[in-house]
Amino acid sequence: NMMDVIKAKKLPAVYLKDPETLATDLQTAFEFYESGEGPVFLFVTQQVLQSKQPLSVAADRLYPKPKVVVPAPSSPQTEQDFEKIVRLLNEEKTRIIWQVGQLSEEEYNLTIEIADAAGLALCDNLSRPGNVSKYKNGQLVPQYLGTLSLYGFSQRAFRYMHNHGKLNPKDSQVLFFFKSKISQINSPFSESAMKNKLRIGQISANPAHLARFVDFPCAMDSLEFLRKLRRALNVKPEVRAFREETLKQLPFTTGDIVSKVATQPLHPNYFFRELNQIVEELIVKEGYDYTGVYDVGRNGVSGYRNVARTRPGFSGWYGRALMGDALLSVNALAVTSPVNILAFVGDGARGVVPDIRASMVENIAHMYRPGAFRKNITIFYMINGLVGLINTYQERMMSHRARRQMRCVSLLDPDVKIKVGDLTVQQRNLYSFDPDFIRESLLAPGQLNFFSVITNHNNTGDGMSLLAADNWQEI
């Protein structure tokens, strides 16, 4: 019984069985939804799906108003936990890394203010890259370390927390998870390492989400916590100076040795380094802004590790890490994203879902009046003939050649550039990196770019494993 399975996972579920009780059942579903306990699962009978009875659901339920924070009465324990964090930030000369989950605009701005005032280091994660990013309104965020996740953690984040490949002493740093469960996907560290080799902090509105081994827990609404913390900050000058100096000692890296060598087929490390240089130039000089989309696989990982972001993006790793989910989301984002889109998809992910090109053109043509679509959407299909992430795992971690199911065949389409009404559709196979062509293509308004990048494959570097993070190639 799937209802039993969902309830065993402590997730809310409602059985919509009869049209006569539909109003009451929906009322229950919305109460679950508004409680903020996670996704609500609806199990619906065919009879309910075919019902034509009008739904008696209030408009404010369908279109909820923005959240208004009403501070809940704090327990003595919550106040003690909060004061412990305040003392840590204000007084202790130690590195503090803050990995954040999904933030509202006010939460984002407060996080940046607090990081600047306290000298905190900031990271985003694999679930939703860009919760914090390297650039904010075209300006560099010096506190940003990069991604910190099971895969794709940045070299700057690794070096901030390690010395010669080993974690810094336990008393020298604290890793905070803000609005985030401490799940495997959001950390390259094992539970044993987090228990024994790191000091861990966690802020969550739900006390049930706080891990048992956390050193600095705080069960508080995130916005209330940030507002209260901003008022309480009074960081000792020598503490702030120490933290700022540790950040200055780690400039933003430009990639490994392999990323500086042009080859044919293109090395993915080289491609992403060159692409990032173009993107950062456009962000600073042209005000370029985009939503990043990262599919499950090696090249999606390389995309969010290496290409600077300007805002939150979408990752296929969220939830169950299903290949192809991120690619399919581009069809909706083409209409809903207020800015340009850059998507990074491996040939393995592309091969398991339908071709979205025709439906994207169709949707844009019907959703926009003539001449109104001015965004640029670019999808990079990284073609290397295999499912690279699992191939890397099998060859590097299991020390044997990858199995037959890790290989895939991609048939390349011819290069074309056509007009469909007011929309320009460009399709090209890229065997080398032409910076002028890429720059021009990313800036073209009202254009869909489908680029198949012919790459090779390697099993080292690019944040794929802690074992490879300190190898000779990294510079």
Image (spheres, grey):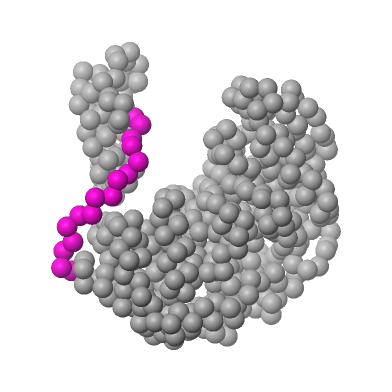
Front residue of 135 and 95: 135
Q: Quadrant of residue 333?
A: top right
Taking the spot 30% from the left edge, 45% from the top edge, the residue there is 68
Relative side of 100 to 227, left or right: right
Q: Is residue 67 magenta?
A: yes
Q: Quadrant of residue 49?
A: top left
* Figure quadrant of the N terminus: top left
Residue 222: x percent and y percent? 33, 57
* Figure quadrant of the C terminus: bottom right
Taking the spot 40% from the left edge, 55% from the top edge, the residue there is 107
Relative side of 451 to 161, left or right: right
Q: Tell me: residue 456, above or below residue 65.
A: below
Residue 65: x percent and y percent? 33, 37
Residue 67: x percent and y percent? 32, 44
Relative side of 431 to 64, left or right: right
Which segment did they paint magenta? 62-77
Taking the spot 34% from the left edge, 30% from the top edge, the residue there is 62
Q: Tell me: residue 439, above or below residue 389.
A: above
Front residue of 297 and 87: 87
Q: Is residue 166 visible?
A: yes
